[in-house]
């Protein structure tokens, strides 16, 4: 099959191209990137209102399989990720049972969903069954396909265990993805200690609950040489620690979520459970510090922390509802509308935080848009806006704190592993499969 993406603005930081070009794809490979290509045998895809970028990678999503399939499955999660513009999605191990064995890792890594939608890459748990007590079978899980290790949803409380994990992880050559939260400082109410806790009367989580763990793990990363990636940073104190660590040359990376970049504790004052997330939405100063770090390059990656829950759970009262926001399908338009359109970051930086840096964190080859590369492309429409309508999400979760937000930058075409898998709201491979063509 041949495709011709016509007149898109191609942004490829690797080839330093950023201009209106055509991209010809033949048999899954990019064969030409030039102006004015014509090829009658190719299916022409109009990209004149579009930005053509190397495929986006989400380093942080909860796909809930096995065990909580009423919230999401690998199939619906991979479909939602693809619709959100992602060609790869890294799923977290806080499932039931947790992804803590090579057997489960293999089952997720070989999921059928990966061949129809976006490729699913599993993380194995750091500690056995995520209990925070013993080291899990990291090497066996790495061999079975785990791309990283994480106890996300929980944090390793013991400095001794964390140090052993870091040393042991060196033998796996995989990064550690760390959810940082000292439970002695965190009541886990998911309300920021500050204005929100004061106004609501709900006990708050201070920023220090995150920052003390970041400080500890920067020290341990320096001492052990482990590859450490901090998940969903939320506070200005954490950013200061990260900035100083990077200045010192310590090999740590970090991600921030769209919701922490766009929303603040002001939203949680209403105690609307849609805004309940861990770590909590923090103050305006914290949000500003995250934005500054995004612009400066101190933040390496934007990750969704897609955390779907059932409607029944998310409509309970705030203190009883589980934390989490379904973010796979809004991440890219939010970043485009709030940061690129407003000229806070440029398209190259967007590609860096969504494609290049996530690939580097995983130690994988960076995608590029040039001849001889397999097509891994995220193409977004920047001319047409659309309101967020969670009812239309492909995720099983039909809830979003961004409902009604008018956004630009929705995915138009997505090529995964050389195949056109998303085409303006359609999923060509799934359709062919259902018609029995494949
Ligand atoms: O809000 C969150 N939800 N934060 C986490 O760390 C875990 C996640 C979940 O699994 O629901």
Image: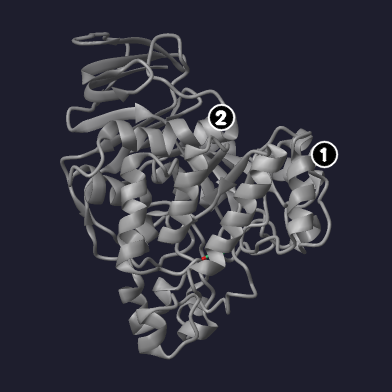
Mark 2 vs 1, N-terminal side? 1
Secondary structure beneath dot 1 equals: helix
Tell me: 160 left or right of 345: right
Distance, label 2 to label 1, CA atoms, is: 33 Å
Residue under circle 1? 140
Tell me: 290 left or right of 177: left
Secondary structure beneath dot 2 equals: loop
Residue 303: tell me if it is visible: no
State the residue at coordinates (22%, 47%).
Answer: 408
Q: Toward the viewer: 156 or 340?
A: 156
Corner quadrant of residue 52: top left
> Where is residue 104 shown, x and y percent of the image?
76, 48
Q: Toward the viewer: 213 or 310?
A: 213
> Where is residue 275 shown, x and y percent of the image?
40, 72
Relative to 211, residue 35 above or below? above
The quarter of the image holding the C terminus is top right
Q: Toward the viewer: 399 or 358?
A: 358
Tags 2 and 1 touching, CB below 8 Å: no
State the mark number for residue 243.
none
Q: Residues within 10 Å of mark 2 (few under 14, many from 20)?
A: few
Ligand 1 location (quadrant):
bottom right
State the residue at coordinates (61%, 63%).
Answer: 153
> Where is residue 417 shown, x and y percent of the image?
51, 26
Residue under circle 2? 438
Corner quadrant of residue 49: top left
């Amino acid at each position: 099959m041949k495709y011709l993406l016509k007149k898109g603005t191609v942004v490829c930081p690797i080839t330093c191209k950023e201009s209106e070009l055509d991209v010809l794809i033949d048999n899954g490979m990019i064969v030409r990137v030039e102006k004015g290509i014509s090829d009658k045998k190719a299916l022409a895809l109009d990209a004149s209102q579009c930005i053509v970028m190397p495929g986006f990678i989400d380093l942080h999503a909860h796909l809930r399989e096995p065990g909580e399939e009423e919230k999401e499955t690998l199939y619906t999660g991979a479909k939602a990720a693809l619709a959100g513009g992602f060609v790869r999605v890294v799923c977290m191990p806080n499932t039931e049972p947790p992804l803590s064995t090579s057997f489960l890792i293999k089952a997720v890594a070989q999921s059928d969903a990966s061949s129809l939608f976006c490729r699913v890459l599993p993380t194995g748990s750091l500690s056995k069954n995520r209990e925070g007590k013993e080291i899990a079978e990291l090497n066996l899980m790495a061999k079975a396909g785990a791309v990283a290790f994480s106890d996300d949803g929980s944090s390793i409380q013991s400095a001794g265990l964390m140090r052993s994990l870091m040393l042991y992880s060196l033998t796996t050559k995989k990064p550690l993805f760390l959810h940082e939260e000292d439970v002695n400082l965190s009541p886990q109410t998911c309300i920021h200690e500050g204005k929100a806790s004061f106004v609501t009367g709900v006990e708050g989580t201070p920023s220090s609950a995150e920052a003390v763990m970041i400080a500890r793990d920067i020290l341990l990363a320096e001492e052990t040489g482990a590859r450490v990636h901090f998940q969903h940073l939320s506070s200005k104190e954490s950013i200061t620690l990260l900035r100083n660590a990077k200045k010192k040359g310590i090999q740590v990376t970090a991600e921030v979520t769209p919701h922490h970049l766009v929303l603040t504790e002001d939203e949680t004052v209403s105690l609307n459970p849609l805004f309940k997330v861990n770590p909590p939405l923090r103050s305006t100063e914290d949000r500003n510090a995250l934005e500054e770090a995004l612009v400066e390059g101190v933040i390496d990656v934007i990750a969704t922390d897609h955390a779907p829950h059932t409607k029944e759970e998310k409509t309970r009262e705030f203190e009883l509802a589980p934390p989490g926001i379904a973010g796979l399908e809004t991440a890219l338009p939010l970043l485009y509308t709030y940061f690129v359109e407003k000229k806070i970051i440029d398209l190259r930086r967007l590609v860096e935080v969504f494609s290049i840096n996530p690939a580097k964190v995983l130690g994988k080859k960076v995608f590029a848009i040039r001849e001889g590369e397999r097509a891994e492309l995220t193409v977004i429409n920047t001319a047409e806006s659309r309101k967020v309508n969670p009812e239309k999400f492909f995720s099983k979760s039909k809830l979003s704190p961004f409902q009604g937000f008018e956004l630009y930058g929705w995915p138009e075409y997505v090529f995964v592993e050389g195949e056109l898998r998303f085409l303006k709201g359609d999923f060509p491979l799934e359709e062919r499969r259902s018609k029995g063509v494949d």
